[in-house]
Amino acid sequence: MSEGSAPGTNPPATATGGRRRWIPFWVLQLTELVVAFILVDVSVHVSNSGLMVGAAVVFAALAITAHGPLGIFRICRPLLHLTLLIATAAVVAVAPVIPALRPDIEGIIVVEFGAIGLIRLATLTDMQPSSRSRRSAGSLSSDPTVIEATVIEVTATRSPGRAVPTPTASPPTGGGPDDPPSSTGAAARWAGRAAGTASASSRRAVAKHRPEAEAKVRKALRGAGRLAGKVTSPADRDRSEAPDDLPSGGHSGPTPGS
């Protein structure tokens, strides 16, 4: 622990150590893709360009499989990615020594500059999280609630057979149905009180509006009865006023000799 640093914290980085790794990881990924594109473009104009095409494919594959902002598959961690990149760039830089893999002079220049540039850039790439992520992690670590929850979770993971007390909030003091639940038992009680309150409210509403509803139903039935009576009364009146003193002959008129 260096002088001036708090106990339990990492000592501050020196100026030399801070400048050794200062390039973001996504810059390295972008550079790999750019170098791969340049190698493919130049390979069209030179002869014996198999080395350039192979190097472009490997660099592009490393860029898209890295666990970084520009990674698509995110298979390789930053440390493994840097190791593979440096090894691949070194092999590509030495490969033109073999006559079967040696491209033209233009291709050799592009291959050497690209491979050596990637090696140098890899030695300057920061593999740690950004400063913003480190600040957010530091603020979370200073929160006692987060520390307590982390300690409880670690203890429960290391001793699965032991019951570890889980910190819960204090139960609601109001006792009303609108109080928020704080645990499983409190949630069940809160749900029961809410259901009871809703049932009582519905019963009161039914008891309050039942007489009015019954009066409206009776009034509607009476109105329907009066309407039915008005519809059927003309037919009954016509039948009652029909002549019923006709003679047996079936016709009416003056009798003979009258």
Image (cartoon, rainbow, N blue to C red):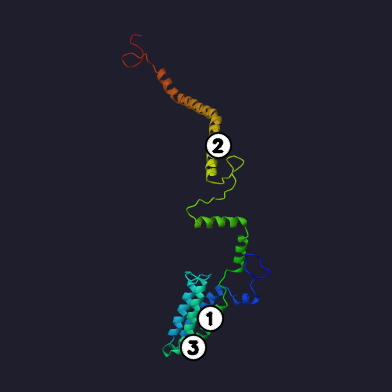
Which disc, if any, is residue 226? none
Q: Residue furthest right?
A: 4
| Front position among marks 3 and 1 | 1
Q: Mark 1 highlights which residue? A: 119
Instruction: Report how far apart the C-alphas of labels 2 and 3 lie in the structure.
Output: 84 Å
Q: Position of residue 36 (x, y in %)?
A: 49, 79
Residue at horizontal 54 percent and vertical 34 percent from the top: 200
Instruction: Report how far apart the C-alphas of labels 1 and 2 lie in the structure.
Output: 72 Å
Residue at horizontal 55 percent and vertical 35 percent from the top: 201
Residue 151 lies left or right of residue 7; in this view the side is left
145 in relation to 64, above or below: above
| Front position among marks 1 and 2 | 1
Around disc 2, counting alpha carbons within 10 Å, would you say few (fewer than 14), some (14 to 19), or many (20 or more)?
A: some
- Going from N to C along the chain, the mark reached first, 2 or 3, is 3
Around disc 3, counting alpha carbons within 10 Å, would you say few (fewer than 14), some (14 to 19), or many (20 or more)?
A: many
Q: Mark 2 highlights which residue? A: 197
Around disc 1, counting alpha carbons within 10 Å, would you say few (fewer than 14), some (14 to 19), or many (20 or more)?
A: some
- Say which amino acid is labelled 3: Ile
- Going from N to C along the chain, the mark reached first, 3 or 1, is 3
In this view, the residue in front, 18 or 43, is: 18
Which disc, if any, is residue 108? 3
Residue at horizontal 62 percent and vertical 76 percent from the top: 17
Q: Residue furthest top?
A: 257
Q: Position of residue 141 (x, y in %)?
A: 61, 61
254 in relation to 133, above or below: above
- Say which amino acid is labelled 2: Thr
